[in-house]
Image (spheres, grey):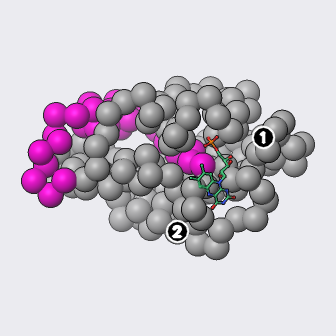
Amino acid sequence: MKIIIIQGSSRSTGNTSVIISALRTHLQADLLDLRTINISPYDYENANRGDDFLPAMRNIVTYDLIILVTPVYWYSMSGLMKNFLDRLTDCLKIEKETGRKLRGKALAVIACGSDNNQTPGFFEPFKLSAAYLGMDYLGSLHTWLVGEPEIEVLNSLSGFAESLKKQKAE
Ligand SMILES: Cc1cc2nc3c(=O)[nH]c(=O)nc-3n(C[C@H](O)[C@H](O)[C@H](O)COP(=O)(O)O)c2cc1C
């Protein structure tokens, strides 16, 4: 099973990356850091079709499981992650064959906030988008980080990784 983790933090080596490193001790996965590529906001005229989004998507659709990891910014996903989701519209309008390849792929989402209070409805946009795209939603996990990760967070990441592996094996 090929797995890609898509990191949506405004800093490459912040808290979200610590969570991703902990996850990668349990799962063998490649990493795409959205901060290192140029994905501009959705444009109705598709004037941005030459940026890095479509090449990134052509690579992403070669994976079986896509894990989106976003920090919690203002009770929601990061702007980088939202831009990325908005641009999936390009795969429905201007490059449909890439969009069709998302069907049947697995999706999972991890949030990283500053405490263990999960914002109600945080994961709904991901679940609904997965359903719309014909993807198999394997689950969500809320984590948090201030300094070193708490044992509860590390254990939840380990359990989440096991659950993803088990679901993909079924
Ligand atoms: C712009 C901004 C907004 C934030 N909003 C929230 C929030 O609504 N809820 C929360 O728990 N933490 C919030 N935080 C804290 C971050 O979610 C938390 O520090 C996270 O671990 C940061 O991950 P990062 O280092 O990858 O950016 C916010 C941080 C920033 C920079």
Determine which residue is flagged by label 1: 158
Indicate left or right for 47 with 66 as reference.
left
What secondary structure is found at the residue carrying circle 2?
helix
Pinpoint residue 45: horizontal percent, then vertical percent. Answer: 10, 53
Mark 2 or mark 1: name the one nearer the start of the chain.
2
What secondary structure is found at the residue carrying circle 1?
helix
Q: Is residue 120 magenta?
A: no
Asked whether residue 100 is in view, the answer is no
Neighbour tally class for label 2: few under 14, some 14-19, many 20 plus, Cα within 10 Å: few
- Foreground: 27 or 6? 6
Q: Which residues are magenta?
A: 43-71
Q: Which mark is residue 124?
A: 2
Considering only vertical position in the picture, is 105 above or below 28? below
Distance in Å between CA atoms under marks 2 and 1: 23 Å
Q: Give the amino acid at mark 1.
A: Ser
Give the number of callouts: 2
